[in-house]
Image (tube, helix red, strand yellow):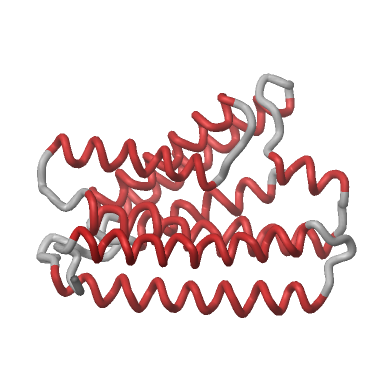
Amino acid sequence: MNTPASREGNLFRYIVYFIGYLMAAGTVKLVTINSPIRIWDLILFALISLMVLLFFIYRFNREQRFFDRSLSGSWLANFGMTIGLTLVVTMLRIVVSWLQAYGKVKLYGFQTMYLRHESVAMYWFLVVALGIVLPILQEFLITGFLFNYAFRHNTMLTAILGIATSGILFSALNWQTTVPLLVINAIFGALFAWSYLYTQTLWMPIYLAVVNGIILMVMI
């Protein structure tokens, strides 16, 4: 029950982690629906996000002792690949922004919301919340814990299913109302998951997700 080999334990733990993520995401929604931003909402966001993040880090590190990590290494071990994936994420995000600028793809929901309540405080909150905090929590949830529990076998089929599932979940957590944006988010999520399998370290998808999130905020 206390190891990643327990299906019942995995399901229970994943539900707990998912609830934790929803709590953090809920505080983001609470902050953004009020304009101007209220200080107590910010404090609540900071406390819950920090609590959930520390819980995720503790649990993920604790579970790693049950796996063979002899092939794992630093996400900076392959500097060329790190730079390459950074450029890929950057170029994909620029292409999406170009398509949005010419009306080929609709704006993200938070972009529309920001344009209605444009302010310096709101902008920097979105940079921190949607550009850094939530992407980190998402990668723990839909890449780290997901592969630990559901896609642990070392086969090509397992890897493909895991990457596809992670991409779909990434798109679902960043839900948009148009099919093109859902597909775009799924592609980003799958790329992050692939980087995790390639490097065997969660720092790589976390890094890429944050790069993606910050660039997305910069291009509002």
Percent x, y for residue 185?
A: 51, 37
- Locate residue 77: give its quadrant: bottom left
Percent x, y for residue 137?
A: 47, 62
Q: Is residue 89 above or below residue 182?
A: below
Q: Is residue 185 above or below residue 38?
A: above
The front one of 177 and 132 is 177
- Locate residue 144: give its quadrant: bottom left
- Locate residue 26: give its quadrant: bottom right
Q: Which residue: 56% across, 38% down?
A: 93
Q: Which residue: 62% across, 56% down?
A: 130
Q: Is residue 43 left or right of residue 149?
A: right
Q: Is residue 87 left or right of residue 118?
A: left
Question: Where the C terminus falls, by quadrant?
Answer: top right
Q: Is residue 46 left or right of residue 190?
A: right
The front one of 159 and 59 is 59
The front one of 175 and 116 is 175
Percent x, y for residue 103?
A: 73, 21
Question: Where the N terminus falls, by quadrant?
Answer: bottom left
Q: Which residue: 32% across, 64% down?
A: 12
Q: Which residue: 14% across, 62% down?
A: 5
Percent x, y for residue 213?
A: 57, 51
The tally of labels here is 0
Q: Is residue 210 above or below residue 195?
A: below
